[in-house]
Amino acid sequence: TMRNLYPDSDDSDEGEGEDDDVNLTHSWTSQSQQCVVEYHLSCMARGHGDVVWNSSSDISEFLVNEEGRARLFGEAVKFPLNRVLEFGAGAALPSLVCAKRGLGKVVTITDQFEDGVFKAIEMSVAKNTSPNTQVVVKAHSWGESEADLVQEGKYDLMIASDCIYYPGAHQALLTSASKCVVAGGIWVIGFSLHGNCKEEEILNFFAMAKAEGWALEREFKIEHDVQEAATWSSVPKRGDVFIKVLAKKK
């Protein structure tokens, strides 16, 4: 989830209650009951990084077992992959599922750096490991240098959950993704329509991606009665999740 979109927001209470909030343990259980993830959140996360959004949960559901992964990726993608990367991770639920289920030899979790957020992610990682997976937490702002992310190699699978709701950041996110992916690599993008701009402005992200050599492989729509992290929202169908699976063709 992207943050720092509102630089003029009032941060006068910044620092109050952070440790208490980070130390709270939350839990997510897959619908199949096959995977339980304990995680931490930071109240210091600006924007939307301090909650688990429907798209993160839905992507995680696909990742939990072989049947879900086959639906999402097809039979040709074999796990474990070499390297998995999540952009704008926030609570990092999809990454934690990848780590716990051993879906990548290396799982890299990224977001803009904030002390509380990274403390929460690191505490979550400590509770969701598997013997054959190395989990790395790194700061990354979209569009900036990818050198630190690809020192050991580029990524077979990338994930972005609820990262495209702000059209002004589309190009920066695409730039980072295109520089970090292996040829033929996969990018899973989950999103809901926040109502902050026109739907076509959000969907234009995928036209931009196509122009950069990304091809749409599969797409899904999961309907929800509410957006669990925004039950107050009056935006129609705010809880519905769209998932698009892209492959880097050129």
Image (cartoon, grey):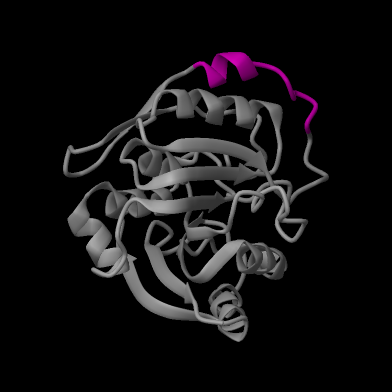
Seen as rendered, the residue at the extreme right is 8
Residue 16 within the segment the image draws in magenta: yes
Above or below, 188 against 140 in this view is: below
- 99 relative to 175, above or below: above
For the residue pair 227 and 138, the one nearer the viewer reads as 138
Q: Is residue 171 left or right of residue 97?
A: right
What residue do we see at 27% from left, 58% from top? 69
Q: Which residues are magenta?
A: 11-23
Q: Nearer the viewer, residue 90 or 67?
A: 67
Seen in the image, is 42 located left or right of residue 14? left
Tally of marks? 0
Q: Is residue 144 above or below residue 182?
A: above
Residue 116 picture quarter? top right
Is residue 77 found left or right of 172 in the rendered image? Answer: left
The residue shown at (66%, 65%) is: 179
Residue that extends furthest to the front in the rendered view of this protein: 152
Side of 216 relative to 222 (left or right): right
- Using the rendered image of the protein, determine whether residue 48 is visible from the camera's viewpoint: no
Q: Position of residue 133 (x, y in %)?
A: 41, 37
Give residue 20's position: percent from left, percent from top: 56, 14
Q: Residue at x 40, y 24 (%)?
A: 127
- Judge by depth and name the residue closer to the eye, 100 or 184: 184
Coordinates of residue 225 in the picture (x, y in percent): 30, 54
- Write down the quadrant of residue 188 in the picture: bottom left
Vertical relation: 190 (above or below) 9: below
Q: Is residue 28 magenta?
A: no
Image x and y of residue 71, in percent: 24, 66
Residue 64 visible here: yes
Locate the C terminus by quadrant: bottom right
Helix, strand or loop: magenta stretch? loop
